[in-house]
Amino acid sequence: MALLERLDGSKKVQIKDFDPDMDGGIKRADAEKRTLALCNELDELQELLYAAQETPVLIVLQGMDTSGKDGTISHVMRYMNPQSCRVASFKAPTPLELSHDFLWRIHSETPGKGMITIFNRSHYEDVLVVKVHNLASPKIVKARYDHINNFERLLADSNTLILKFFLHISKDEQKKRLLDREGDPTKAWKLSPTDWEERELWDQYQTAFDDVINRCSKPYAPWYVVPSNHKWFRNLAIAEAMVEALRPHRKSWEQRLEQIGTEGLKQLRAMRQSH
Ligand code: AMP
Ligand code: MG
């Protein structure tokens, strides 16, 4: 059975029903071995994906500060070929970005065919931080769920595989990680006083995540709630979900490659004959 449930909107969920400490009964050393094997398969699948030039892949990472978005990128994604994989990080919008609709800055970062793009934060901030801090009216925020669903539907209709991960940590684990950062000069650069202020709004954020997951989980753009108190479990679970999403396409990409190869050889022979 898969470690993570693929939420497609067919049932209502609440974040608090997911245990952030869950480790699937797996030992850390076993998890690391399995993650490595999955990451090697991911690398192979990515090569096929890139060569076949048929499918864009969009990975969305969301979560509270210290939930492990950067860690996931460096641990799971490091096995992929940087030629066909990129990260787009979304910070507070610039005045230019704010002068457009909220999806303007997002759309231009979506992957093209054969590419994998990882969103480190995303358009979901526009119904998370924006909602929690009242940066837009409730009416505007409410309309955004439909805009997001329609936008992701457009991407999916254009053949994009979409996987969205909510990295779920407990409030205590966040405190521990923030204090660890203070004590570690190599990590202190990530600290920001606003991390502690945002922490005060923990419950409001969890409710906003509940809304996101219930309103924007679709068969064509599922959410996965990733228990992330154990970083090694988080890495394993995300690697597995990615491989399971890409693996069914292997045959079709291989066939496409064969087709491209045959076509190329035909053209080469024709060129040789004409000289
Ligand atoms: P970090 O990911 O820690 O570098 O922080 C990026 C910050 O940008 C976070 O505090 C986000 O909440 C904020 N941010 C990202 N997107 C938006 C947005 N659309 N509106 C307001 N703040 C945002
Ligand atoms: Mg931060």
Image (tube, helix red, strand yellow):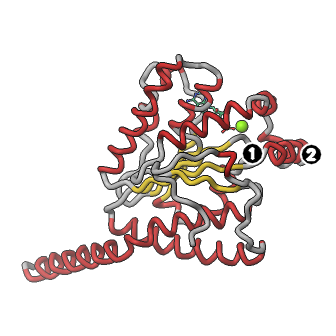
Q: Position of residue 180 (x, y in %)?
A: 88, 47
The residue to which callout 1 is attached is 66
Residue at position x 75%, y 45% in the image: 66
Q: Position of residue 257 (x, y in %)?
A: 30, 75
Q: In the rendered view, would you say 252 is above or below 179? A: below
Around disc 1, counting alpha carbons within 10 Å, would you say few (fewer than 14), some (14 to 19), or many (20 or more)?
many
Answer with left or right where residue 263 lies relative to residue 116: left
Dot 1 beta carbon under 8 Å from ligand 2: yes
Q: Amino acid at mark 1?
A: Thr
Answer with left or right where residue 138 lies relative to residue 188: left
- Asked if residue 256 can be seen in this view, the reply is yes
- Asked if residue 117 can be seen in this view, the reply is no
Which quarter of the picture shows residue 236? bottom right
The residue to which callout 2 is attached is 183
Q: Quadrant of the C terminus?
A: bottom left
Spot the residue most to the left. 274
Dot 2 beta carbon under 8 Å from ligand 2: no
Q: Position of residue 171 (x, y in %)?
A: 80, 42
Q: Nearer the viewer, residue 199 or 51?
A: 199
Q: Amino acid at mark 2?
A: Gly
Q: Quadrant of ligand 1?
A: top right
Spot the residue most to the right. 183
Precedes in sequence: disc 1 or disc 2: 1
Q: Nearer the viewer, residue 159 or 213?
A: 213
Residue at position x 84%, y 49% in the image: 186
Measure the C-alpha gap from mark 1 to mark 2.
Answer: 15 Å
Answer with left or right where residue 185 lies relative to residue 136: right
- Secondary element at image label 2: helix
Residue at position x 49%, y 54% in the image: 163
Residue at position x 42%, y 25% in the image: 101
Q: In the rendered view, would you say 99 is above or below 39? A: above
Around disc 2, counting alpha carbons within 10 Å, would you say few (fewer than 14), some (14 to 19), or many (20 or more)?
few
